[in-house]
Amino acid sequence: MFFRATLFTSYYQITAFFAGKDRLGQRLTVPEYFLCGMFTGAVAALVEGPIDLFKSKMQIQIIRAKSGESVMYRNVFHAAYVIVKKHGIRGAYQGLPATWLRNIPANSAFFGFYELCRTLSIPEGGTVFDLSPMALLASGGTGGFLYWFLTYPTDVIKSTMQADDSVVEKRRFKSIRDCVKKLYNDEGGWRRFYRGFTPCLMRSIPANATLFFVVETIRKYLPL
């Protein structure tokens, strides 16, 4: 919830900046929406990165606890506290370059294709506020689908690097390039980068269709 609020707030602030005073209240061009999505992805990574990292550390701990290994974190908040205390703020941003590698193109596609679909769906003589619920749902579903369809391998890289050891010297992966090389050579070739791909796509369409529909409904009736 917090991350989604940050994501959409960032996006609408960035689109307002691009519009400037001269085009305030007017729609941007479709290429500008793709560009706004890129900047949104870069900014959102600063919030999403640590959140995903702490969740990842907890998930790994749960798996290891089943095999009898000791538990280090009591919950996600405790994981955040321990990681920052032991490794500083840099510890919270483990895998940040990989997060940017995913977030920048992914959010460009997410918002760009959403706005493209909305633009193509505007009725003659109307505006985006005249779109039917079905048009909004279809636009949101398309944006969410292409977010994952176009960038899923980069999410695998990001998640893998965040799941690595918190201690730099003990990490298996030294860089994004090293991660790609080792995953490809040691864990099944290109198929390793598409593990869980189909379920992710199936989930992305209804989830993001609903997300965008709710956001646009709120924006329509509240002075945001």
Image (cartoon, helix red, strand yellow):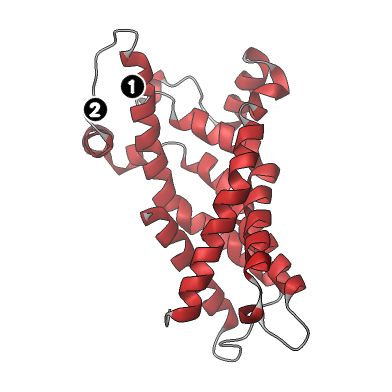
Q: Nearer the viewer, residue 20 or 147?
A: 147
Q: Residue at x 61, y 29 (%)?
A: 196
Q: Quadrant of the N terminus?
A: bottom left
Q: Residues within 10 Å of mark 2 (few under 14, many from 20)?
A: some
| Secondary structure under the numbered disc 2 in the rendered image | loop
Residue at left 43%, top 48%? Answer: 48
Q: Quadrant of residue 153?
A: top right
Q: Is residue 81 above or below residue 190?
A: below
Please name the residue that numbered disc 2 is placed on: 73
Give yes or no for contact between labels 2 and 1 (Cβ–Cβ under 8 Å): yes
Q: Residue at x 58, y 77 (%)?
A: 18
The kind of secondary structure element at disc 1 is: helix
Residue 13: image x %, image y %?
48, 73
Kindly identify which residue carries mark 1. Answer: 61
User: Separation of disc 2 and disc 1 at Cα?
Assistant: 8 Å
Of marks 2 and 1, which one's residue comes earlier in the chain? 1
Name the kind of residue labelled 2 in the image. Tyr
Label of residue 94 in the image:
none
In this orientation, does residue 169 appear? yes
Q: What's the residue type where badge 1 is placed?
A: Gln
Image quadrant in which you'd find residue 184: top right
Residue 119, position as x, y percentages in the image: 72, 73
Whether residue 11 is visible to the viewer of this picture, yes or no, is no
Q: Which residue occupies the foreground of this view, 89 or 190?
A: 190
**Of residues 102 and 213, which is closer to you in this image?**
213
Residue found at x 61% / y 21%: 183
* Front-most of residues 1 and 64: 1
